Amino acid sequence: MQGATDSAKNIRADIQEIRNKYVMVNSDTTCELCGSRLLVQGFYMFPCHHAFHKDCLIPEVMRHMSSEECSELERLLSEESSGSREGATAMARSSTKAKIDSMLGSQCLYCGDVMIMSVSQPLVPPENLEKELLNWK
């Protein structure tokens, strides 16, 4: 029982330490996906220093999700946008944002499991292969 209590204390301390970490973002930092300046819209910055606009990250992350996860994320995004228009409670908005952050910001698109799992996928989708081959001639 004491071991479980100590473990819980350590986990709480780790979570608190992570909450207090920050990264300095320069005004000329760009989105890894679109190349536009990062600070012009909402973004995610990962500990590895890769940074993505939220709107750029969503479709890329969804490509690697199950259909159920995609549906859930779409529902949350819809709830987020309608909630801000309809005056949803701060607690409901915060909960929705936390769930979205969990789905989009849990790991870097380039350094996390998503990239590792994509190693077995072709770099060029089969439907675009002919077009790409013509570009190389």
Image (cartoon, rainbow, N blue to C red):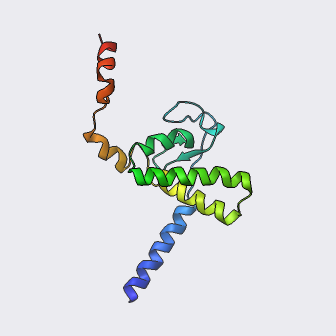
- Lateral position of residue 74 relative to residue 92, left or right: left
Rendering coords of residue 54 (x, y %): 56, 43
Furthest-top residue in this view: 137
Rendering coords of residue 116 (x, y %): 31, 46
Counting labels gives 0
User: Which residue sits at x=45%, y=40%?
Assistant: 60
Q: Quadrant of the N terminus?
A: bottom left
Can I make out residue 105 in this image?
A: no
- Lateral position of residue 39 relative to residue 3, left or right: right
Position above or below: 88 against 118: below
In depth, the one of 17 and 84 nearer the eye is 84
- Image-quadrant location for residue 123: top left
User: Which residue sits at x=49%, y=49%?
Assistant: 46
Can I make out residue 23 in this image?
A: yes
- Lateral position of residue 84 relative to residue 108, left or right: right
Position above or below: 127 against 111: above
Position above or below: 116 against 1: above
In depth, the one of 117 and 82 nearer the eye is 82
User: Which residue sits at x=45%, y=73%?
Assistant: 11
Q: Quadrant of the C terminus?
A: top left
Furthest-left residue in this view: 120
Rendering coords of residue 6 (x, y %): 42, 82
- Lateral position of residue 136 relative to residue 19, left or right: left
Rendering coords of residue 89 (x, y %): 71, 64
